[in-house]
Amino acid sequence: MLTLHGILELRDYVKHWRLTSQKIALVPTMGNLHAGHLRLAERAREAADHVVVSIFVNPLQFGPNEDFKGYPRTLEQDKARLAEAGIGLLFAPSVDEMYGGNLEQVTRVDVPGLSGVLDGKFRPGHFAGMATIVAKLFNVVQPDVALFGEKDYQQLQIIRRMVADLAMPVDIIGVPTVREADGLAMSSRNQYLTAEQRSLAPALFQILKELAKSLRNGRRDYQRLELEALRKLSAIGMRPDYVAVRCANTLSLPEETTGEFVVLAAAWLGRARLIDNVEVKINS
Ligand code: AMP
């Protein structure tokens, strides 16, 4: 597998594919790859002739008190995993290569409505930082298709909106969440959990599934359902940021007649901030 670190060399390398109308897929990641990332890469191989995986821990999407410095960086291990998965090209730029040491002044891409709710309330600036790096990677790689995990549900909707609003010629594919055997959504941040916390962590998905079941059973008292789930999370020792019942895709507040929901949550467990979501479709 070839690893490139520079924008110009990457552009030069993919140019031939573009000129010969071969289809390119991009899988943006922050590295420390697990089976969730590899599922994205696998789907990318099905969707295109060539796959570019990017690894970049993007300082722009971390708040001042977040884990940018301590975020797990495991490039050699990641390379081995990608090579084993049959990926041909890894793009792993430095912060300097992407931003030229000018983080404050760099142009931002902002998707205001969707970025200001849920996770965006607790992580100011996070989604603008994320959308900015994804837009830049699109410009560098010029992919036909890009793949994102449904685990980061709000992120996926923001990317879809950005691509639509800015008429970016990229198809976005959402890939279902890959989970551990006990239901915990795979995440690079799960390794911050102690053994005891790790045994408690699957409760987040369980509690979201219980809420989803209540919706299927006809309950429409959304705020009450959120409150009940928040209480359950606190009772087992998590510190929830939010539990929210929203309309699928738009993330707007549901009404009595809403038929497609997503239930989302973020909760701290020790040093780890876990996020997860469950979609619910009611057959009318
Ligand atoms: P990250 O490295 O955390 O920025 O994630 C890179 C991409 O992998 C994003 O599109 C994530 O949504 C996706 N991803 C992360 N964890 C999972 C998972 N457990 N299942 C599916 N996709 C995932």
Image (tube, helix red, strand yellow):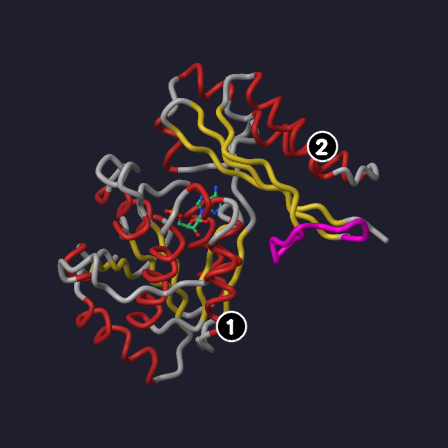
Residue 274 in magenta stretch: no
Between the residue at mark 2 and the residue at mark 1, the CA separation in whole angstroms equals: 35 Å
Label placed on residue 224: 2
Mark 1 sits near ligand 1, with its Cβ under 8 Å away: no
Q: Which residues, given as a range, are shown in magenta?
A: 247-258
* Element on which disc 1 rests: helix
Q: Quadrant of residue 187?
A: top left
Q: Is residue 195 left or right of residue 79?
A: right
Whether pointer 2 and pointer 1 mark residues with C-beta atoms closer than 8 Å, the reply is no
Name the image quarter holding the N terminus: bottom left
Q: Where is residue 282? Give x, y as percent.
A: 79, 48
Q: Which residue is mark 1?
A: 164
Label placed on residue 28: none
Please give the name of the residue rendered at 42% of the width and 32% of the height, measured from the top-left corner: 273
Q: Is residue 222 left or right of residue 196?
A: right
Give the camera-side residue of 170 and 46.
170
